[in-house]
Image (cartoon, rainbow, N blue to C red):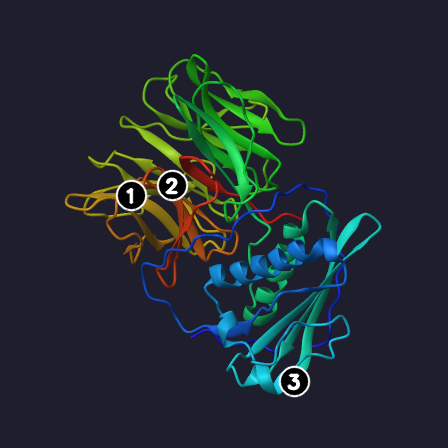
Amino acid sequence: MLKTKRNLLAALACALVTAGLGAAAQQPVLVDITKGVDARISIAVPPFATQDPGLGAAAEEMAKVVADDLTFSGVFAVLPRDLYPVAFTGFTADLKSVDFAGWRATRAENLIYGLVFQEGGQIVGQFRLFDLISNNQVYGQEVRVDAKNHRLAAHRFSEEVIRYLDGVAGMGTSEIVYTGVSGTTKEIYVADYDGANARKLTDHGSISIKPKVSPDGNLVAYLSYKDRYSFLYIFDRRTGKSTPLSKEVGLNSAPAWSPDGTRLAITLSKDGNTEIYLRNPDGSNPVRLTKNREGDTSPVFSPDGSKIAFVSDRGGRPQIYVMDSNGNNQTRLSFHGGNAFDPAWSPDGKRIAFVSEIKGEGLEIYVMNADGSNPTKLTDSQGINESPSWSPDSRHVIFSSNRSGKELYAVNVKTGEEIRISRVGMPAEGPSWGPRRR
């Protein structure tokens, strides 16, 4: 049962946040619910107020962004607009129109008010959260962003509402990096976590796949055939340039960042079998971690950097193993009835998502405890499901599926609710969920 927390941020908190990233207006996120939901906190998010006629559309979209973020979190049930108080015609800047009794009659527990205006070339959002049980304002925030990026202001506020009422910040400001498919080419793209504001990163005119975002969000490791062979590269989002990470003979694949961003674990076959190595982001200081007669691949660091989960078929079929980050103490984690591969460690360190291949099921996304116990199926036998990656708050796993073409989906690990990320505008695969933007 999710419960409202009222012991966080006892007094009104105000924050000033600035950012300069561009964003384009988008349609509301398409949500396909395929499984049941848990008890949720009821909250109303009416259209935000503005005294500037030119900001009407932006204010409306910002309210929708906040509502979508709260719904996506799995923590909240957003009150439908047809249940608003009959007398409600919109908020005013001075809050005199707030009808607490009327809102309370809708059975909403909380109410969000927003005022949007322009100042000094920026869009300013002044947001307030009300507890409808006590009739008190319990949280407030002011967010300032570049005039072209009003969505980011809404995302920032929704993160803090979720933190205030549930104790863990949302991930509205996070981004996803993925492979976009266009004809015979595949390039690396980035978008807001909900699929909005998609833009291309690489433009190699080739096959570029398997992107992995660095912990600070600035770098993207990926595999590309742009130089004919499967080499690894690092794309720097600040400069727009790619540099080689590994161009060894044979297979170069499966990059994974260490939590501090100083090292990458990769898979190479230059010495015969596929083995796991460590390298610096500039390709220097290589260290071999595994030495096995069978193949080892798909490394992923634990959030504290002390462990690496990986895939090995040393037991006869692919399964998940774990070792110390220096290669010591290699032990088997999964004892799955079929094949288990493509592990992804949750940011809170508690669970590992992976792809399962069991006869009669196809490829499905599973999650297990970090010690290998309690493997649980997340997807529901629709299509081929692969490439799991965790949200920053460890509530969701994003993955790609071909159930209705190549698309991205996110599943709430607690409720099983699946959400189709519908706005990237093209076939997409191989997602990597990046950090929150600051």
Number of callouts: 3
Image disc number at residue 407: 2
Image vertical order of residue 349 relative to residue 227, above or below: below
Residue 262 x %, y %: 59, 34
User: Badges 1 and 3: C-beta atoms under 8 Å apart?
Assistant: no
Viewer-side residue, 385 vs 92: 92
Residue 220 occupies quadrant: top right
Identify which amino acid the numbered label 3 is placed on: Asn
Task: Look at label 2 and name its amino acid.
Answer: Glu
How far apart are the alpha carbons under marks 2 and 1?
A: 8 Å
- The residue located at (63%, 43%) in the rendering is 23
Dot 3 lies on which element? loop
Label 1 vs label 3: CA separation? 47 Å
Q: Quarter-wise, where is residue 207 in the image?
A: top left
Relative to 166, say whether 256 is above or below.
above
Q: Earlier in the sequence, mark 3 or mark 2?
A: 3
Disc on the earlier residue, 1 or 3 = 3
Q: Are marks 2 and 1 in contact (CB under 8 Å)?
A: yes
Q: Image quadrant of residue 1?
A: bottom left
Q: Secondary structure at mark 2?
A: strand
User: Residue drawn 53% across and 86% down?
Assistant: 105
- Where residue 135 is drawn, which disc sits there? 3
Question: Which numbered tag is attached to residue 235?
Answer: none
Give me the C-alpha separation between circle 3 and circle 2: 43 Å
Where does the image place residue 313, in percent across and percent down from the top left? Answer: 25, 34
Q: Secondary structure at mark 1?
A: loop
Q: Name the amino acid, label 1.
A: Arg
Residue at the spot of label 1: 403
Q: Residue 265's x, y, as percent?
A: 47, 32
